[in-house]
Image (cartoon, rainbow, N blue to C red):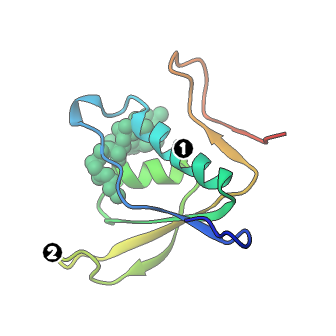
Amino acid sequence: MPDPEGDRGEVHILAIAIHPDHRRAGIGGALLEHALAQGRAARCTIATLEVRPGNAPAIALYQRAGFRTVHVRARYYQDNGEDALVMLSELSRLMWSAPSPAGAGDAVLRVPK
Ligand SMILES: CC(C)(COP(=O)(O)OP(=O)(O)OC[C@H]1O[C@@H](n2cnc3c(N)ncnc32)[C@H](O)[C@@H]1OP(=O)(O)O)[C@@H](O)C(=O)NCCC(=O)NCCS
């Protein structure tokens, strides 16, 4: 959500889900980076999300995009009372780039001009 009066807006990621037949193809990472780029364009300064501690694929995806765990929210999930990890990424000038579809290289950090 942008802050119209300054640089305090926040992107909150509610859900990313990829069909099981199409996972590990870079789609989730691309969607996440698109959301973060939209946030940067709107002058948001942080992105946050909640994730289940046992969701290793999602945690790996988020860590790769620069998120780190900053808090554990107790009994967050209503279906089983599970805790949630609260993860945060600072939307600095450094931007994460996914590998090209052709697999031409590793993820890189780039600095916009
Ligand atoms: C989490 C999810 C969205 C990832 O989508 P995806 O399109 O498969 O992810 P990507 O292919 O873009 O993967 C990007 C990176 O995330 C990490 N990652 C993704 N899936 C992973 C897995 N199963 N195990 C370990 N790391 C994984 C890797 O670092 C990966 O990079 P790499 O493939 O070069 O190693 C997908 O697994 C999913 O839909 N899960 C079910 C829904 C869900 O749990 N959503 C999150 C709710 S908070």
Q: Secondary structure at mark 2?
A: loop
Q: Which mark is residue 97?
A: none
Q: Residue at x 56, y 28 (%)?
A: 99
Residue kind at label 1, given as amino acid type: Glu
* Location of residue 62 with respect to 106 vertically, above or below: below
The outermost residue toward the front is 4
Q: Secondary structure at mark 1?
A: helix
Q: Position of residue 28 (x, y in %)?
A: 41, 40
Pointer 1: what residue? 33
Q: Which of the two discs, 2 and 1, labels the residue nearer the N terminus?
A: 1
Residue 22 located left or right of residue 5 = left
Q: Where the N terminus falls, by quadrant?
A: bottom right
Front in this rendered view, residue 66 or 2: 2
Front in this rendered view, residue 57 or 40: 40
Pointer 2: what residue? 80
Residue kind at label 2, given as amino acid type: Asn
Q: Position of residue 49 (x, y in %)?
A: 44, 65
Q: Tag 2: Cα neighbours inside 10 Å, few (<14), some, or many (≥20)?
A: few
Q: Residue at x 59, y 17 (%)?
A: 104
Q: Position of residue 98 (x, y in %)?
A: 56, 34
Q: Position of residue 5 (x, y in %)?
A: 72, 73
Spatial CA span between label 2 and label 1: 30 Å
Q: Residue at x 49, y 67 (%)?
A: 87
Q: Tag 1: Cα neighbours inside 10 Å, few (<14), some, or many (≥20)?
A: some
Front in this rendered view, residue 85 or 42: 42
Cβ at disc 1 under 8 Å from ligand 1: no
Residue 1 located left or right of residue 24 = right
The outermost residue toward the bottom is 74
Residue 13, image quadrant: bottom left
